[in-house]
Amino acid sequence: MSQSLEAKVEFEDVLSWIKRIGSDSSSTVPLLQAVQSKYGYLPRAAMDMIIQNTDITGSQVYGVATFYSQFRLKPVGRHMIRVCHGTACHVTGADRLDTSLRHILNITDEEQDTAENGSYTIEQVACIGCCSQAPVLVIADEVSGNLTGANAQRALKKHAKKNEEIVANI
Amino acid sequence: MDVSNLNVIVGEGTCGIAAGSKEVIEAFQKHAPEMNVRTVGCVGMCHQEVIAEVNDGNGNRHIYGNVTKKTVPQIINFHKGEGDLPEKQLIFSPDDQDLDKWRYLAHQTRIALRNVGYLDPTSISEYEARDGYKAIKKILAGMTPEQVIEEVKTSSIRGRGGAGFPTHIKWNFAKSSPGDFKYLICNGDEGDPGAFMDRSLLEGDPHNVIEGMLIAAYAFGASKGYAYIRAEYPLAVENFGKAIKDAHELGVLGDNIQGSNFSFDIKIKEGAGAFVCGEETALIASIEGDRGMPRFKPPFPAIKGLFGKPTIINNVETLANLPWIINNGGEAYASHGTEDSKGTKVFALAGAIKKGGLVEVPMGTKIRYVLEDIGGGSSSDLPLKAVQLGGPSGGCVPENLFDTTIEYAAINATGAIMGSGGMIVMDGTTCMVDLAKYFLGFTQNESCGKCTFCRIGTLRMRELLTKICDGKGEMEDLTVLEELTEQITKSSLCGLGQTAPNPVATTLKYFRDEYEAHIKDKRCPAAVCKSLITHTITAADCSGCSLCEMQCPVDAIEGQKKIKGSYVIDQAKCINCGMCFEVCNSKAIIVQ
């Protein structure tokens, strides 16, 4: 990774979420959701702050963070691309959306999911419930359906242009 | 002609948005700012998205499908009296109410879905105008909880989330449970890939679900409710959240509803992505802030559930039927369906089907009717091969069993399950072994890890299926798969594990020939499994356009631009991803 994508965690932010959501054990999931919606992942520092300032234990925070597929422990790019891998998308070519997007973002290492320039992260998600428009993907919060690999790239290029991000030119 | 008295209604569920509804709305606002544009939930005709209705407020409706920003001016011009009727887009008009496209809806019986696509989900007054909150007011004006349960018993509705447990019996368990504080949970954790009816209901008719929760809560005596909604459904969370707020303001939610001594409030809990949380005890663990792992039953949640209190968990679709049942009577509901299964069921049609979307039909309807008469049959030139019912817990029903009626018992007899209602339709381009591998990959990934057979058994099954798809399978592997099927089913605590082998069991039962082709002939009949296929370019058909070369992610294709027939695929580099096949306009790429 050419630049660090690690987020800088503000103590005040975490405290305000604890104040709003609560500090009992049943607040674990919503607290982590608040952290992730701000930073795109769960920075270690934010989890430590939760443990120190609530009744939630470290094992519970880590247990929950590693159980649910929504939570990530690794930093993400500036924008998220979520490729749906529900059944309908699987049988209509969700694989090709992954291939074509990884190609245009030049992500060649199978272990990686974020472009070298920190622009986009590709995530595979379970069904987003738009099965009749399969295959479907979501860039940031824009849903596009009935895609081929080539027009998935087109959708990404359009988003990149609007957000001044650089993707490979194919 | 002046069009300022005309209303434009655009369907804006997630699927409408995916198809481009935002652009269509912008186009209407740009070309005819005098028209009154508003949005509604998804009517379920996903194959026609984006759908726009133009009406004069007096019942004269024109409904158009496949609307794009380019066709909007044509629609506006027609209504201005300045152009021809856009016939290609027309689904319904006052002059022609029997168009083929409209039959998709006309052939359905809509009870749970009665409002979606007809009202603005963010407007409580539109819900009220369609008999909204009438049922709960009727109840509070003079029905005892016992009478409500009796009415629901008469309707014979069974839980629509998949298990099909009679709703009134479940309620009675919690009602007779001691304790003055009880919980109701609305299960909107629609985790089955391929099912989206709950999303549509939560997004498109949230007040109906809230009213259903009120009815259930009143019946067994709950004072607090949770709506557990998948995080993957942001629009559902947004619309449902607004609906809760508006219901409070109207006085149908909160303390002493409608001046009675019935109090009930609802809080949204967003799921965090775990299929197993569709299971009741796992869902409870998740709300309590733990890893969503199932717990032993008994004690059943109706006795000791959320935070140790008696808890009932009802599925979104079940709840969405309740206001209708109270308003129209249990008998009216039970008049639909069969002896075994009463009422209607919503299905989500997708895959290789011409008209995908949401379909609500009476129980007892034949699968074939849903697929062919409503769904319009195969979307390709190829005949339909099978339909997958019930997601990862379900099974594949082959074409020769399409005359099976939709009833709990009849569907179970095929090896599939009713499930939550996902129907993924497949033609010859779907490999059944790959599909089984896909589902096992899903359940293995989603297994919470508590039970050994589920945790490791599904992994072993997935490994065997991968081996077969890679062309390295042996006939003995099929025997091991069958053994594992039995063991995992018997040795798992919850529904996830007990049903995880179903996709393998049914494909092995009905499509054994495909497994054998992979093993004996090292061939994938559907040309899907990457290790068993090759991509080649037929020189005679190649136009030399270079699109395939540009799209190849591994630089396996070389040739000279603009020289016909010059492109060749280097088989040593090719990963069979299919990108070249997809972009080739001259159909020069052969997959076999």
Image (spheres, helix red, strand yellow):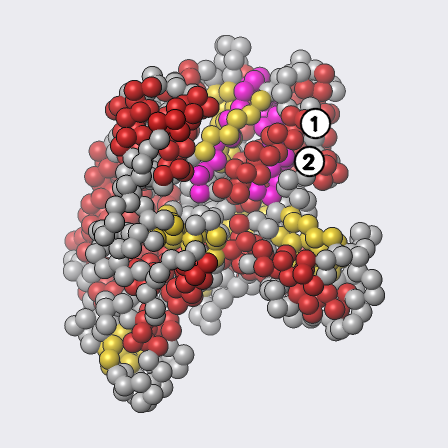
Quarter holding the C terminus of chain A is bottom left
Verify whether residue B310 appears in magenta: no
Residue B341 sits in which quadrant? top right
Vertical position of residue A18 compared to residue B346: above or below? above
Which residue bears the numbered disc 2?
B124
Which residue bears the numbered disc 1?
B250
Give left or right: position of B271 versus A55. right
Verify whether residue B231 appears in magenta: yes
- The spot of residue B590 in percent (x, y) is 31, 77
- Chain letter of disc 1 in the image: B
Q: Pointer 1 and pointer 2: residues touching (CB < 8 Å)?
A: yes
Q: Earlier in the sequence, mark 1 or mark 2?
A: 2
Magenta residues? B203-232
- Taking the spot 72% from the left edge, 36% from the top edge, the residue there is B125
Task: Tell me the number on the disc at residue B400.
Answer: none
Neighbour tally class for label 1: few under 14, some 14-19, many 20 plus, Cα within 10 Å: some
Is there any visible trace of residue B576 in the rendered image?
Answer: yes
Q: Could you tell me which secondary element the residue under label 2 belongs to?
A: helix
Give left or right: position of B577 versus A89. left
- Chain letter of disc 2 in the image: B
- Taking the spot 31% from the left edge, 25% from the top edge, the residue there is A49
Vertical position of residue B12 compared to residue A149: above or below? above
- The spot of residue B162 in percent (x, y) is 46, 38
Nearer to us in this view, B150 or B174: B174
- Taking the spot 21% from the left edge, 56% from the top edge, the residue there is A109
Please name the amino acid that badge 1 sits on.
Leu
Please name the amino acid that badge 2 sits on.
Ile
